[in-house]
Image: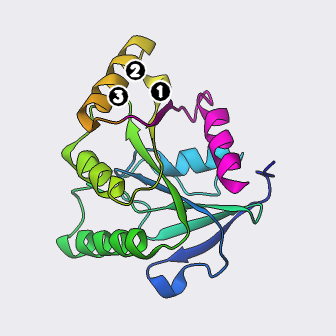
Amino acid sequence: MLNLNNAKLEAVAASLSQYPKNQLPEIVLLGRSNVGKSSLINTILNRKNLARTSSSPGKTATINFYNIDDKIRLVDLPGYGYAKRTEAEKEKWAKMIEDYICKGNYIHAFFQLIDIRHLPTNNDKIMYEWVKSRNLPQVIIFTKSDKISKTAAKNNIEAAVNKFNFTGQTIAFSAKNKQGKDEIIKLLEDIAK
């Protein structure tokens, strides 16, 4: 069992030299800006502000490594697809994400977060295909599930799965009502074993 209360922000990195050196399995969180990666981290780890949340997209501008019980690490990548940044900033973020995904030796799985209220964007599809080429487990987590009806949520999940031709696990998640939290924790515990 993971002690989720024994969690800390272990490193904030903008380059390979700043990544944590100890070898723990890493779960990578990817998603568009403002999709709810920080809210998911805080919900899973029973914290309010371990990961800083913001209503403004583009808050996470570094790679943030969260150590859970010295057994596993959540890695929060900057959000992709946010238009209100300079081209130089977008290129820097893209390079940072690419370097981590290509050189991160301890990646065990990818959790791609998609806002359940919207159909996946082309950026979501591109990221999905790129990550798929790494041949590691992928889970799609549909965030903000409390904000639409169960029927609409089911329809949007089906549409996304069809768009991606995805056969893996999907989870509907809500930071507000904790839907999907136990499923995500079980995945983390399975990987941490």
Q: Residues within 10 Å of mark 3 (few under 14, many from 20)?
A: some
Alpha carbon separation for disc pair 3 and 2:
7 Å
- CB within 8 Å, label 1 to label 2: yes
Whole-percent x, y for residue 155 in the image: 33, 18
Q: Which mark is residue 117?
A: 3
Alpha carbon separation for disc pair 1 and 2:
7 Å
Whether residue 168 appears in this view of the structure is yes
Relative vertical location of residue 115 with respect to residue 117 in this rendering, above or below: below
Colour pattern: rainbow
Whole-percent x, y for residue 135 in the image: 40, 56
- Dot 1 corresponds to which residue? 145
Alpha carbon separation for disc pair 3 and 1:
8 Å
Q: Which mark is residue 153?
A: 2
Where does the C terminus fall, quadrant-wise? bottom right
The residue that appears at 33% across and 70% down in the rendered structure is 98
Whole-percent x, y for residue 113 in the image: 42, 44
What's the amino acid at mark 1?
Ser
The region drawn magenta spans 167-193
What's the amino acid at mark 3?
Arg
Ranked by sequence position, the earlier of labels 3 and 2 is 3
For residue 38, side relative to residue 121 (left or right): right
- CB within 8 Å, label 3 to label 1: no
